[in-house]
Each structure stands twice: as C-alpha cells, then as structure tokens.
Amino acid sequence: MVTAVSTKNADMLILGGGLVGMTLALAAARKGFSSHVVDRADPAELTAEGFDGRASAISTASWNLFENIGIAPALESFASPIASIAVTDQMKPGRLDFQPAPEDGTLGRMFANRRLRLALHEAGAAEPLITLHSKAEVTERTRDDYCTSVTLADGKTLHTPLMVAAEGRGSPTRDDAGIKLAKWDYSHRAIIAGLTHEKPHDHVAWEIFYPAGPFALLPMQDREDGTHASSLVWTVDESDAAGTLKLSDRAFLAEVTKRMGDMFGEITSVGARSSYPLGFHHTAKITGTRLALIGDAAHGIHPIAGQGLNLGLRDVGALVEVLDDGRRIGLDTGDAQLLKRYENWRGLDSFMVALATDGLTRLFGVPGKAASAVRRLGMAGVERAPVLKDFFMDEARGVSGDLPELLKA
C-alpha cells in the first residue's frame, strides 16, 4: 500500500483517495505533476477481500485511460467483457439489444471494485510523485488567490497551488466552499449482491425495468471452479429495502428468480448483500478559487446506465489535459483561466448525462399497462433504427463528445 512521510509541496492536493481521486493522482503523475492525496480511509481495509461487493462497468474510453496511465495490465486478467446490453420492460416482448460490430470491440468491461482499488493503490505505491496521507482527518481548509492549504489532525500542513475535491457525494470540501447543489432523493435503495448460476451469461448485461426501479444483472468472471457469476443491482422502494435485505438466502433468491426468470438456469447462491440510497445531485459549478470538483463531489447520478464512475474518469482526463496545456505556457495548476476551461468543458457534458439518467429513471418508473406498452413500442422503434442504436452504444462506450486525449486509444 501507499505510505506517506513527506509533507513537501506538490502541484495539487487531492482530497479523497477513492477510485476517481487515485486515478487523478496517477494520470497527473504521468504528465509530471506531483500530488498529495488525503483520504480518511485505510487502504488496507478498502482493498480487503469482502470489503465491498460492488462492481463497476468500465467503458471503452475509461479503459483507454487505464491503458494510458499504465494500470490496464494489472487489471486485464480480472475483466469480464460486456459483449452486449439487453434492455427489457418487465421481461415482456419488445426487448432492445445493443451489440456492437466486431470491429468496434466490446461495450465495456466489468470489474469488482476491489480489483480496481488494488490496481490503483499498487500503482500509487510505485509512483514517487504521489504522496498518500491515509487515515487522515482534515481539520482546516484555506484557499486564496495565491495558494491552497489543509491542516491535518496530526498537525501537518500541506500547501499546493490547486485543491481538488474527490471525496464523493458528501464532499465536505465542496460544502466548505459554499458551492450550491441541486439534489433530490429517489426514495429508492440499490441492493447489491453477487450471484452464481447454472447457465453462462454470455457476457450480456441485462437491464430489466420494473415500476419500482431497474433490476440489473451484470456479467462477472466465472469463479475459479468454473461456476458462472453475475453482479445484481436491484432497485427497490426505500420502504421495502430493510425487509428485502433481511430475507433468508432462499427467499431472496426466490424473489430474484421471479424478476429474471430462468435465463441463467438455477441461481445456485447469493453472496453478502449490501445497499445504498439512491439520489441525484449536481453542483451549480465545478470550480472555485484554486478549486476543482471531480467525480461524485460534482455530480451524483442514478446507476441506471452504469455511468457514474465513467463520468468521474472523464473529469480526470479533462482536468489533467487542461493543466498540462497550461503548464506549457507557464501557468500554475490553480490558474483561474485553466479552471474556467475545465468548467466549460465538463460542466455541460456531466449535466446532460445526469439529466438523461434522471429522465430514464422517471420514464421507466411510470406504472400501468399503458405506460409499459408505450415504452415497449419506443424500444421496438429504436431496435429498428441503426443510427439511434449506434448513438446509444457510443454513449455507453464513452466515445462520444469532446473526449480528453487520455481517454482516446
């Protein structure tokens, strides 16, 4: 794991050492930028077996970023390709299938979050430009026109030209800066569990929509003994969540089977279950004086399309590119011109993705047979429109729009 003893000045201060924060530190280091990464968590706990059952879909563009910063080789053997995506309304006729042409490769790769954390922290341990302060509490933050600094609970003070908030949805740095937030609660909770099953998933990611919320089955690698495995992300009403989590394994699997049918044959086991509340938030701006927000600190979206982490990785690529361009003309990392460019680049894109996921959530949440029939009619129309399907697949792969260089092959 990465350890820290130095308090020397660096080019940036990254508050939050999660998936997005550590990726930023590594991407910045590849361009010659040094960083202090301050995180409350203990890396040993974050990377421990069984810490977090969550998995993430890594888009094509995000995989390009991992290749460009050098962590892809450590991850490749743990990847489960997403060959296609199947979308259905309550398993009724009118299914929509997204399958790219062979020359376009896959729609992404699935990874256990633990594997991503391990790769990032091991790469960080080998990178002299990264200093990680783990199990560290920030007691004071200051920013002015010339510098930023934080004081840690152990008395250390770190000074850098740029402060980056990467602490996630509840970012104290964002709140301390007084940045306004538009947010609402969906009154739903995502239940996460690993499933093993009789039949192979054929690398298909399933998105099954029910009025209570989406029921997603994500293809994971087979276990060492050849058992087929998938990750379940099941959205339930907040009022039903506690009872669903308390079900016996047998009762839980019966409810799961009721929603997915026998597409995977018998569901043979379910792993430890966890859950988290679902909500939407988006900041009015993603920069301040010598401050940049990335990842969930700037935008928190519904997991309906699996784009939350990928959106944060696009932030990483854009911010590093802006800073690298600025250095070539003699600007420091916290220069207002550079932060304005980052704001203009990422603000609109992240907002549009957030609105799209929110709209999908509401559209598929309308109950009733008539609403279901209209949705299925719309999906049938998309299924027969190659241009529309290509557009949606490009969005899923993260290769549309103004892409940062680090996210290109």
Image: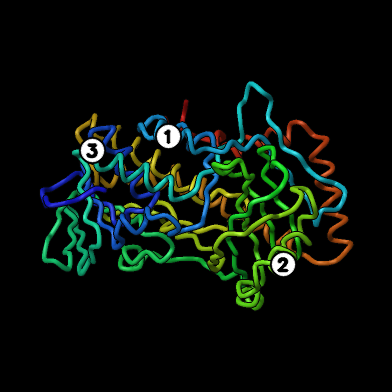
The amino acid pointed to by label 1 is: Leu
Question: As drawn, is 383 to the left or to the right of 245?
Answer: right
The residue at 86%/54% (across/down) is: 374
Q: Which x, y percent locates residue 360?
A: 68, 55
Specify the quadrant of the image occupied by residue 367: bottom right
On residue 127, the disc is 3
Q: Residues within 10 Å of mark 1 (few under 14, many from 20)?
A: many
Q: Position of residue 222 (x, y in %)?
A: 59, 42
Q: Quadrant of residue 15?
A: bottom left
Q: Is residue 343 above or below residue 143?
A: above
Residue pictured at 44% horizontal, 37% vertical: 75
Against 352, residue 80 (above or below) is: above
**The image quarter in which residue 105 lies:** top right
In this orientation, which residue lies closer to the viewer: 90 or 336?
90
Residue 341 seen in render? no
Instruction: Identify residue for label 1.
Output: 65
Of labels 2 and 3, earlier in sequence is: 3
Mark-to-mark CA distance, 1 and 3: 17 Å
